Amino acid sequence: MRFLWPELLWLLLALPLLAAAYLYVMTRRKRAVVVYPNLTLARTAMGPAQKLRRHIPPLLCWLALAMALLALARPSATVTLPADTLTLVLAMDVSRSMEAGDVAPTRLSAAQEAARHFVEGLPSSVRLGIVSFAASATVVQPPTEDHQDMIEAIDRFELQTGTATGSGLIVALSTLLPDERANLEALLLNDQFSSFGGIPAPLGKNSEVEAARKREEERPPVEPGSYRNGAIILLTDGRRTTGPDPIGIARMAARRGVRVYTVGFGTPQGGMVGGDGWSYFMQLDEPTLRTIAKLTGGEYFLAGSSGDLSKVYSNLTTRFSLERRDTEISALLAATAAFLLLLACLLSIRWFRR
C-alpha cells in the first residue's frame, strides 16, 4: 500500500493517546463506589456480558477514526478489477505450414477452433481485430465488439506461402493504433523493399519513408507495457521467411508501450510437415517469440497441441477480463469508517439507550 499524502500519517499518533485516555477514565470509574438497591440488579450490572458491551461502541469509534485518518492520507493499492474497455488485435499465421495434419484435423483448423472459443470468452467490453499474415499481412477484421463478426472473420482465413512475421506484427500495431497507421505503413513499405535487395521505393514514396523514419527516431519512448487500452496476440507455427525483422517491429511496439503476447504453435525441435504431395522441415522460432514478448512487456506461450492452445487462450481471456492496477482506496476506507461509526451509534442506543 502506498500513500499520496504520507505526511498526514502523523495524525495516527493520536490513536494510542485516545486509547490511553479511555483506559485512564475506565480505571477511575472502577474506584468509584456504586450502591445498588438490590442484589439482582448488582449481578446484572456486574455481569461479564455487560462489562464487554460497554467497551464495544468506543472501540468501534476508535476504529472508525483510524480508518478516517488513513483515508486522509489517500492510500492506493494494487487491486484486481474488471478490465476497462480495451482493444485486442489477434495476428495469426496462415502460411502453408498451418495445413499440416500433426494436429487434427489440421493446425489451421485447430487454431481456428481455439480462436473461436477465445472470442466467445471475451467480455463485451473488449474489441477484437484480426490480422492474418503469410508472405504479406492483411486486416481480416477491424476491431469490433460483435463476436459474430469476429468468428466469421476467423472462418475466412486462407492459406498462403511465406511467413512475414514482422509484417503481421506491424499491421497489427497499425490496427491497434489507427492514428499512427500512415507512419507505420510507410515504415513497413521501406522494410519490404529493403528486404528484397534494396529495390528503390516507388516514385514519391522516398520522402514519405524518410519522414516516417525521422518521426520514429524522434519519438520519445515510454515504458514497455504501459499502454493499457489494448494489446496484440501473435500466433505463429514457424519462423520468418520474408518481410521485416519482427524484433525491430517489436521495439517499435515497445516504444509505444504496446504489449505483445506471443504464442508458438508447434514444437521447438521442429520436424517434417506436409500434406497433399508437399513436405518440408519446419521449426518454431521460439527465441524470437520470447524476445518479442520480453521487449514489449508481454508473455510467451508454447502450445504443442490444440488442447494446449485452448489453455493459452483461456489464460489470456482471464488476463484481459481482469487486471491488476494501482487504485486509490480512500473512498473505501472512508465508507468503512462511516459504517463503523454508524454501527457504534446503533449498538449504543440499543444497549444503553444513549
Image (cartoon, rainbow, N blue to C red):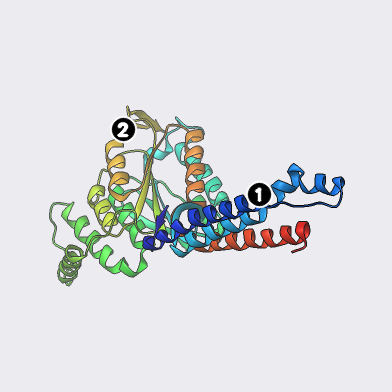
Q: Quadrant of residue 176?
A: bottom left
Q: Give the image location of residue 295, x and y in percent.
A: 27, 48
Is residue 322 shown left or right of residue 287?
A: right
Q: Amino acid at mark 2?
A: Gln
Q: What's the residue at 75%, 52% (across, down)?
A: 34
Q: How many marks?
A: 2
Crowding at dot 1, Cα within 10 Å, few <14 / some 14-19 / many 20+, comes out as few
Is residue 305 shown left or right of residue 148?
A: left
- Figure check: 51 above or below 62: above
Q: Give the image location of residue 289, x and y in percent.
A: 31, 41
Q: From the viewer's perspective, is the residue at label 1 or at label 2 nearer?
A: 1
Asked whether 106 or 257 is in front, the reply is 257
Crowding at dot 2, Cα within 10 Å, few <14 / some 14-19 / many 20+, comes out as some
Q: Quadrant of residue 205?
A: bottom left
User: Can the viewer see residue 262?
Assistant: yes
Quadrant in the picture for the C terminus: bottom right
Q: What's the residue at 49%, 42% (across, down)?
A: 315
Q: Give the image location of residue 282, x and y in percent.
A: 32, 33
Residue on which disc 1 sits: 30
Q: Amino acid at mark 1?
A: Lys
Asked whether 346 or 225 is in front, the reply is 346
Q: Which mark is residue 238?
A: none
Mark 1: which secondary structure? helix
Mark 2: which secondary structure? loop
Q: Earlier in the sequence, mark 1 or mark 2?
A: 1
- Figure check: 286 above or below 251: above
Marks 1/2: CA distance? 84 Å
Residue on which disc 2 sits: 283
Q: Give the image location of residue 70, x and y in percent.
A: 48, 59
Q: What's the residue at 33%, 29% (across, down)?
A: 270
